[in-house]
Amino acid sequence: MTTFIRKLMMVLAICAASLSFAERTNFKGYPNYVSFDLPEEFKLEETNGNSIYRLFNPVQNVSGLITFYPQDRYETPGAAMDDIMKKLGLQFDMSTFTWNKESAAVSMYSGIIAGEKISGYGTATPVPSRKTVALILAYCPEELAAKNNSMMVSFVDSFFNDVDSYFIPGPMTSFTFPDSGKTLPVKLEIAGKKIETKVDSNARDGAQYLIDREYSVLLLYQKSDQWQKAWQRYYRMIFRDSYGRISTAAYDITEALASESADYTELAQKLLDWTTGMKYSQEAKTGGFSPLPSILLGQHSDCDSRSMLIAVIMQSINQDAIIFVSAEHHHAIAGLVSDHPGFAFTVDDRNYLTGDSTKTGITWGKISADQADQSKWIPVMLP
């Protein structure tokens, strides 16, 4: 067994990660990984010590309330949600479920807050490292609820309670599309290797739900000066959701390719060659993005979904991979940190070889001359 393969197997077993989101909301007294990747334009309005945070989006007229309670105050997160909803005098429907291996609760509610009729969503989830329960509420005036539905759900869904939660669907998505316990077979051929793997039977629908929801949030920023940040967040939310949904497939793919790869870049080249041979098509409704589980099951794909697929698989073996998107070129490419020579874009002092998943025969570190201006590309940093 080569040194590369031994190293790869160790990474597959451990799956460590270095978290480096540029756009995160953290909380004093909590580790940095306890955070939110909130939609743009939310502003912190007031706090009560280090336990209550109120946020407001003046453009969409959506409010957020984040509260931390000692875990021993309530028997379960569901009990916390039930108590707070009743104390606020709200009408609510609540369900409990499992998120990130812990009991959690979700609610849909309506009523009067500060003299105004409101509607909203919320979750209560543990924060194990601090022995607290995070209660997360998003709401807006009742007459705007239909318009702001995706924004409110996305706000609540953007919470991370530990390192593992950066690589699984958020609480709202997990509640709506939990793992079914049943799988669909996936048969692939990459670099001459026949690979048999699987995805959960709910993976396609869950991934599509997340993409549709986040695309509707993204459209709210079309005329905003925050559109680039909103675009980056759109892809970060897809990465988070996709990583957990195809983790088994990513493991099986990299394990199969490792034995005939000299290093990570050669493995990544096999992935690049594989994606260029996929059926190409766009989904206009979701900006062209195809769910990664669907791609593995044989559905068409576009440049950004292919680039994301490569990035997710490489990230699964702890390799620094990202994507770049361009409004000017209407295109997306993958980026990979590598010691191989070639054309690269520089982000945060790291050089990312570019990889175009739509051009047959291309190698990492090659780009068309008319697309080589880095100022025309927006980097999407991934954890």
Image (tube, grey):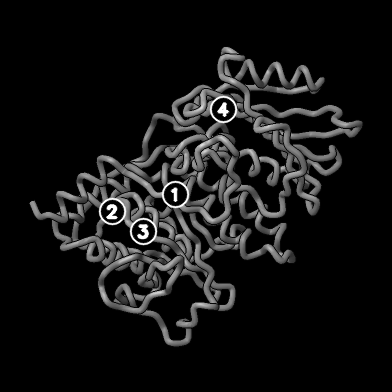
Q: What residue type is labelled 4?
A: Thr
Q: For this view, does 340 lie left or right of residue 347?
A: left
Task: Tell me the CA gap for discs 2 and 1.
Answer: 31 Å
Q: Helix, strand, or loop for circle 3? A: loop
Task: Tell me the CA gap for discs 3 and 2.
Answer: 24 Å
**What residue sits right under mark 3 in the picture?**
320
Q: Which of marks 4 and 1 is nearer the N terminus?
A: 1
Crowd band around label 3 with a 10 angstrom C-alpha radius: few (<14), some (14–19), many (20+): many
Q: Which of marks 2 and 4 is nearer the N terminus?
A: 4
**What residue sits right under mark 1 in the picture?**
19
The answer, for residue 179, to whether it is visible in the render is yes
Q: Which amino acid does label 2 sit on?
A: Leu
**What residue sits right under mark 4 in the picture?**
125
Marks 4 and 1 in Cβ contact (< 8 Å):
no
Crowd band around label 2 with a 10 angstrom C-alpha radius: few (<14), some (14–19), many (20+): some
Image quarter for residue 153?
A: top right
Task: Tell me the CA gap for discs 4 and 1.
Answer: 21 Å
